[in-house]
Image (cartoon, rainbow, N blue to C red):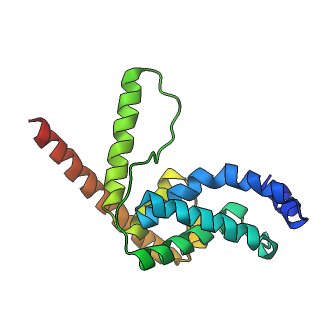
Amino acid sequence: MDDIYVRKVKEGDVEAFRYFVRTYQHMAFSVAISVVKDAFLAEEVVQEAFMNAFQKIASFKGQSKFSTWLYRIIVNLAFRKLNKEKKWQIDSMDVVEEVEPTSALDQLQDDERKHYINEALKVMPSNESLALRLFYLEELSMEELIAITGWSLSNVKVILHRARKRFYAALNTLLENEVKMII
């Protein structure tokens, strides 16, 4: 489907680009916030990334999926913005979109799960947070992760390994602190 819209935009149908914005806006924000850790900066990165993608779509050769190309733009812009702004804060956001809960208890459990995932990702380095989000939450392959980030296969494996360990440690700390507050 992306190929059809890429062709339309390349042929001058400016309105066809809206398809990409609608399709990828949430994932784009998710990727950006993984790196910059600030909702306002993430929105800036996403807006700039879509503008860049629109302006440079003629250079898209179709050697990868459009989404991979777009996410690579987002990751590059996000790391540039992070280096420029030196921001390390994040606003709450939903990272896991799940099937519609069946009861209020399920909804509460889903909301708590999202909260703890977000809080754990907040305290992690940007590259580890990004790797976890892309690989586990967005279920991208190693090859797609390499294409998006520009990291080598061995680097991706190391980052994912460290990220998993750091994520579990952060999650355990959060849960321990929550239990202490209750008691």
- Asked whether 63 or 77 is in front, the reply is 77
Q: Is residue 80 above or below residue 32?
A: below
Residue 66 at x, y percent in the picture: 72, 63
Residue 133: x and y, percent? 47, 57
Q: Position of residue 121 (x, y in %)?
A: 36, 57
Residues 169 and 54: in front is 54
Identity of the residue drawn at 34% across and 58% down:
122
Looking at the figure, which quarter contains the C terminus?
Answer: top left
The reply to whether residue 143 is in sight is no
Residue at (88, 59) in percent of width and height: 13
Name the residue: 43% across, 66% down. Answer: 36
- The percent position of residue 76, horizontal first and vertical second, equals 55, 75
Decide if residue 5 is on the left or right side of residue 140.
right
Q: In this view, does 42 lie above or below 127?
A: above
Question: For residue 125, what is the image quadrant?
Answer: bottom left
- The number of callouts visible is 0
Name the residue at 43% across, 79% down: 83
Left-right relation of 59 to 26: right
- Whether residue 168 is visible here, answered yes or no, is yes
Q: Is residue 119 left or right of residue 28?
A: left
Q: Specify the farthest residue to the top.
A: 103
Furthest toward the right, the residue is: 11
Q: Nearer the viewer, residue 157 or 106?
A: 106
Of residue 108 and residue 138, the one placed in the foreground of this image is 108
